[in-house]
Amino acid sequence: MFRIDITFAAVLLTMFLCTPAPILFQVQAQDWAPADNPLMTRWSEETDRNNSPVNIVVFVADDLGYNDIGPYGNSQVRTPNLDKLSERALKFNEAFAGSPTCSPSRASIYTGLYPFRNGAHANHTGIKEGVKTLPKYLQELGYRTALAGKYHVGPIEAYPFELIKTTNVPEPGYEDRGLLWTDLNMEPVNEWLGKVSDNEPFLLIVNDHSPHVVWPENPEYDYREVDIPSFHIDTDETRQSRSRYYTDITKMDANVGKLMKSLEEHGLSENTIFIFTADQGPQWAFGKWSLYDYGIKVPLLMKWPDVIKEQLETNAMISLVDLVPTFIEIAGGNPDNQQNFDGESFLAVIKEEKDDHHERVFASHSGDGTMNRTPLRMLRTSDYKYILNLAPQTRYDTHMNKADDHDGGREYWPSWQTMSFVSRHAASVLWRYHYHPAEELYDIKSDPNEVVNLAKNPDYKEVIEELRIQMTDWRQQQGDSETGAYERERQNIHVPYIFE
């Protein structure tokens, strides 16, 4: 690099001394840069790229366990495209959603506010009037903003995305089965990327439908060889469902690969930040609709050429409400000049200027229609997890053990109930699943699977008292006065699941 600088300086000095001044100062740089000089050409390209606003592409998986993909240590699931992405990405080991439920989580991603402040704190509910969203923020900074795939936020006028049409298509062979049998069509995304302007930076959000249930009926994995988490119950039926879930993850990974390929083919990769994450955990026990880490912790991978130069990882604690202020700062804006976000920009973490972010993050679950009626609140630090159950008298039930119109529990739950009469482990799993005390406290470092509740342990009295105070303060700041499951009928806002 030193020899290149000296050579270039010599060229400039020679031209300055040998060229008449009137001519020198009338000539533009691109006019005198020799086309066949690789040093000059590369300098010009790098200068243009560094001065150009960077594009932002976000791929969001639907209902994915953070540790159910290759980059986070799962050696059984085939995720070659995510593995490739992680080779030049910053991996966040402590990233969390604002809710373990679809609509509230997505609303948090797009507003930078936790669910109670943006208004969409129960599933299928919309944000409050006047709440500003990500596409509006970036449009004001000169960005074109587009969205493909699943929508599931509302009201629709509050999210002024350019909607890439025909990205939501029925799964072949299941055209009349309903919205849960919807696939992501990536070809319109490829066509859209082929038409973007070099002079207009863009934000593109691609929301997949996988691995949300319903999982593919014909698995590509041998059910006898899949792994079963220790906090689940190992039956043949569980393994068969697990193999279908893994098949859907691999299907999602293929869409990640298509998006990465499109960016490369259209010459966009080098000036684009590529981010992969998920809205929350999977539809498995202690996952979705719960505030255990399997439900609320999410993968977060970020590739940024020339900024993130190699595979890195960080233990900085991030919430998905941090994405909006981070994107604003990346786009050249000042998030501090906007409304009072719950999230904070983590651009300094990305640039390795600091190695920490939040001391604590929060999350909430209010309800999902006629099921999942046990509202929960969570406070998570690097050491502890505190969960407040607002209706401990109510048995915890979800679509996993109640829904009979689709799989994602129906296939294996009867086998769990049968095993609970012959296995102490199975009985313990079902008991912990259904019955939640008013408070739960877990030492994350020594008990990462959150099995041993320390809330009544006198040795942790000071810890839980401090976390209790922090939770109370946060709920007051959020305007969270709910004491039971939220009745969706109170909010007359249309929240489309998909768009055409």
Image (spheres, rainbow, N blue to C red):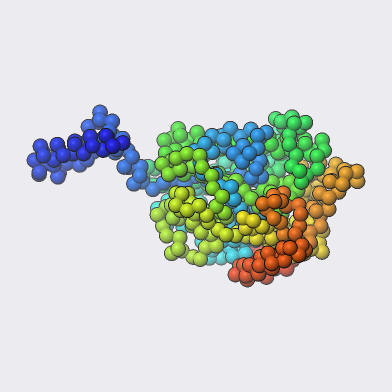
When the figure is inspected, residue 436 is found, relative to residue 44, above or below; the finding is below
Q: Position of residue 432 (x, y in %)?
A: 80, 53
Q: Quadrant of the N terminus?
A: top left
Q: Is residue 260 above or below residue 93?
A: above
x 55%, y 58%: residue: 358
Q: Quadrant of residue 423?
A: top right
Q: How many marks?
A: 0
Of 316 and 398, which appears nearest the observer?
Answer: 316
Q: Position of residue 324 (x, y in %)?
A: 51, 55
Please tell me in which quadrant of the rendered image residue 320 appears: bottom right
Q: Nearer the viewer, residue 114 or 474?
A: 474
Q: Name the spot of residue 375 as percent of width and height, x first.
A: 73, 61
Q: Residue at x 63, y 39 (%)?
A: 73
Q: In this picture, is 143 found above or below 12?
A: below
> Which quarter of the rendering shows the C terminus?
top right
Q: Is residue 406 visible?
A: no
Locate residue 455 relative to residue 130 in the image: left or right.
Answer: right
Please report the residue visible at 81 percent of the width from the left and 62 percent of the height from the top: 394
Name the one closer to the observer, 382 or 433.
Answer: 382
Decide which of 470, 205 is in the foreground and name it: 470
Give residue 30's position: percent from left, percent from top: 23, 38
Q: Residue at x 26, y 38 (%)?
A: 5
Toward the front, the furthest residue is 459
Left or right of 446? Residue 347 is left
Side of 182 relative to 422 (left or right): left
